[in-house]
Amino acid sequence: MGNKEQLLHDIGIVDFVVTELTLYLDTHPHDQRALEYYAHYNKMKNQMEREFSQKYYPLSTRLEDCGNEWRWGAAPLPWEGACE
């Protein structure tokens, strides 16, 4: 697994944690420890996505992920073999 694939894999793991914490906080909104975990992992996910976007291509259409140019279309499409 190359660096790009490893980074995407790691982003997926952290994104899963953030999603699960979001669901948990929907039913436990006053759990301070869960809020702290959410803040920590969300910050980590944002940093990882920013790093990936700077090195390869943006993972979202947020303007800060594109810099001074529109790079959203730079990502390989699934039928181009990027998902194998």
Image (cartoon, grey):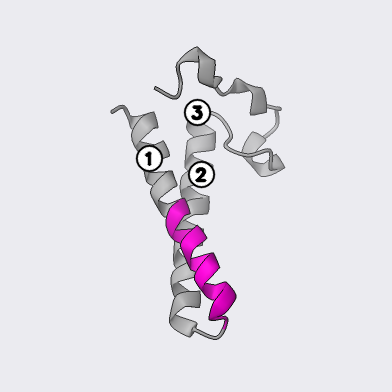
Q: Which residue has dot 1 on it?
A: 9
Q: Earlier in the sequence, mark 1 or mark 2?
A: 1
Quadrant housing residue 8: top left
The N terminus, quarter of image: top left
Q: Residues within 10 Å of mark 3 (few under 14, many from 20)?
A: few
Residue 56: mark in rendering = 3
In the rendered image, the vertical position of residue 29 relative to residue 80, given as above or below: below
Residue pictured at 45% horizontal, 16% vertical: 81
The residues colored magenta run: 15-29
Residue pictured at 50% horizontal, 28% vertical: 56
**Residues marked 3 and 2 touching at CB (< 8 Å):** no
- Asked if one can make out residue 4 in the rendered structure from this viewpoint, the answer is yes
What type is the residue that disc 3 sits on?
Answer: Tyr
Q: Earlier in the sequence, mark 3 or mark 1?
A: 1
Q: Which residue has dot 2 on it?
A: 49
Label 1 – label 2 distance at C-alpha: 11 Å
Please provide percent x and percent y for residue 6: 34, 36
